């Protein structure tokens, strides 16, 4: 068993507790969103922010920029593959309309603590268009002085000048899609980006003053082996990003058309994936990275780790964050929002998006209104996802319940995790042990009342 100060993991534990389950970037999970949640429901929640006497949380803003020049075969994102850069002009025009409609509903308190550009490929937009989009956002929202402005970067699409321009626009965080450096793997997923290219982009980000750089890696890709991924890790560790996300490739060709281009016989076996995962975790910990949770690692002095140690870590649609609860406003196709006790999601296609906005309607397709029980369970599950502890007295005070009575059934179900020493439960709290940190979603699933009503087959595993 590998033992480090605050995490213990072993092959045997992973084989036993790596169950299919949600990643809980929200609770209830997005598959519960339904079309009874309409544009009107969303507008009612936005309007609640203008009610007198309400102390609004600041905003977190997400902008979905769906265009990409070429298709990566592993991709599960909502994207549009095109070489025609002219298509962004029209998209920006509609984003401007959506922003104006939403801003008018929100009222005057439009402080923003976070901004994230995701995609697609945000840098498919030209420098002038990125400037225009930021000016648009700044005309509607007041970014707090310490706001986090993040952007996803495809290293194939940027120059040194791009990174300098993004820093000048106020971006201070960036996330690079690295995935794997092996040429055979890159070839088999149609994403060719040599080490030197990524190194150059990361060096340019540092030079431009970006405070935090994240690298996304994917294991389980075709043609990957223990040896090849070991070499990728050598190079990633050499680049020393502040954060690393180590994602598991889920091969679901029936759901994601792009994945049908992957040759299934090139995929590593389940056993090989497990060994690649184990090796990766060991190597990242040995290199001084700290395990934050699920598939996320950071350097010890990164804000994420500080928040983890202070017990102020949060989880939202973008993963782990240091920011306390914000209302999330999503712009663009398929963007997700969270306002008050509601979740919402916009239509997925450009056609539907443009049609709604042409009719002066917000492009809401579906969503979810949380009950008091959902809000309470969300609090418990998110606390567990951030490695706890779940403090019963604090929950009792906030929700007017008696934890031990309200969750009597769930506490019984937790018993086998207690026996396996993944958690400790006493009269006052649930604590996640170093052994349990990798399996918090299995523990969280006990509190998910919707899981009991459906199969978990559509969810992924950690490995
Ligand atoms: S992985 Fe990123 S760059 Fe590749 S097709 Fe998907 S969204 Fe586009």
Image: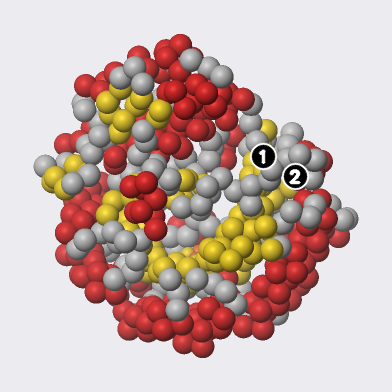
**Percent coordinates x, y for residue 176 in the rendering:** 42, 69
Report the front residue among 442 and 222.
442
Report the front residue among 400 and 370.
400
Residue at left offset 73%, top offset 76%? 89
**Percent coordinates x, y for residue 177 in the rendering:** 42, 68
Depicted 65 relative to depicted 394: above or below = below
Q: Is residue 451 left or right of residue 63?
A: left
User: Looking at the image, can residue 142 be seen?
Assistant: yes
Which of label 1 and label 2 is nearer to you? 2
Residue at left offset 28%, top offset 29%? 423
Q: Is residue 37 left or right of residue 249?
A: right
Mark 1 Cα-neighbour bin, 10 Å: few <14, some 14–19, many ≥20 = some
Depicted 190 relative to depicted 274: above or below = below
Assess mark 1: CB under 8 A from ligand 1? no
Q: Determine which residue is flagged by label 1.
A: 340
Q: Is residue 199 left or right of residue 255?
A: left
Q: How is the image coloured?
A: secondary structure
| Residues at discs 1 and 2 in contact (Cβ within 8 Å) | yes
Depicted 33 relative to depicted 159: above or below = above
Mark 2 Cα-neighbour bin, 10 Å: few <14, some 14–19, many ≥20 = many
Q: Determine which residue is flagged by label 2.
A: 49
Q: Secondary structure at mark 1?
A: loop
**Percent coordinates x, y for residue 68 in the rendering:** 56, 71
Report the front residue among 271 and 280.
280
Q: Secondary structure at mark 2?
A: loop
The extreme right residue here reads 359
């Amino acid at each position: 068993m590998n033992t480090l100060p605050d995490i213990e993991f072993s092959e045997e534990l992973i084989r036993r507790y790596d169950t299919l389950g949600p990643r809980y970037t929200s609770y209830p999970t997005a598959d519960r969103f339904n079309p009874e949640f309409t544009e009107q429901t969303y507008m009612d929640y936005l309007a609640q922010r203008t009610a007198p006497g309400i102390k609004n949380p600041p905003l977190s803003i997400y902008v979905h920029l769906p265009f990409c020049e070429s298709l990566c075969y592993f991709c599960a994102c909502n994207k549009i593959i095109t070489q025609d850069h002219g298509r962004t002009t029209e998209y920006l025009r509609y984003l401007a309309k959506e922003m104006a409609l939403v801003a008018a509903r929100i009222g005057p308190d439009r402080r923003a603590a976070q901004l994230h550009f995701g995609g697609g490929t945000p840098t498919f937009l030209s420098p002038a268009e990125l400037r225009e989009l930021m000016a648009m956002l700044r005309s509607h929202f007041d970014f707090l002085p310490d706001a986090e402005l993040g952007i996803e970067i495809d290293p194939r699409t940027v120059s040194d000048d791009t990174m300098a321009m993004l820093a000048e626009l106020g971006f201070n965080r960036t996330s690079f899609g690295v995935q794997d450096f092996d040429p055979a793997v890159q070839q088999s997923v149609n994403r060719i980006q040599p080490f030197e290219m990524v190194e150059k982009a990361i060096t340019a980000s540092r030079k431009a003053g970006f405070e935090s750089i994240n690298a996304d890696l994917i294991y389980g890709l075709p043609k990957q082996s223990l040896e090849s991924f070991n070499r990728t890790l050598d190079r990633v560790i050499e680049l020393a990003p502040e954060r690393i996300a180590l994602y598991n490739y889920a091969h679901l060709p029936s759901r994601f058309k792009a994945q049908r281009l992957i040759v299934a016989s090139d995929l590593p076996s389940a056993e090989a994936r497990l060994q690649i995962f184990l090796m990766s975790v060991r190597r990242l910990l040995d290199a001084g990275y700290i395990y934050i949770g699920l598939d996320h690692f950071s350097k010890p002095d990164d804000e994420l780790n500080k928040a983890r140690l202070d017990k102020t870590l949060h989880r939202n649609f973008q993963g782990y964050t240091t920011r306390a609860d914000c209302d999330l406003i999503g712009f663009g196709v398929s963007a997700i929002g969270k306002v008050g006790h509601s979740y919402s999601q916009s239509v997925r296609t450009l056609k539907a998006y443009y049609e709604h906005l042409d009719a002066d309607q917000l492009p809401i397709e579906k969503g979810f209104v949380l009950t008091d029980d959902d809000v309470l369970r969300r609090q418990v599950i998110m606390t567990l996802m951030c490695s706890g502890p779940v403090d019963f007295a604090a929950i009792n005070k906030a929700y007017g319940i008696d934890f031990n009575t309200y969750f009597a059934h769930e506490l019984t179900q937790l018993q086998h995790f207690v026996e396996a020493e993944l958690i400790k439960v006493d009269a006052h709290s649930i604590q996640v042990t170093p052994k349990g940190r990798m399996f918090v979603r299995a523990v969280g699933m006990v509190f998910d009342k919707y899981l009991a009503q459906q199969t978990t087959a559509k969810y992924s595993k950690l490995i």
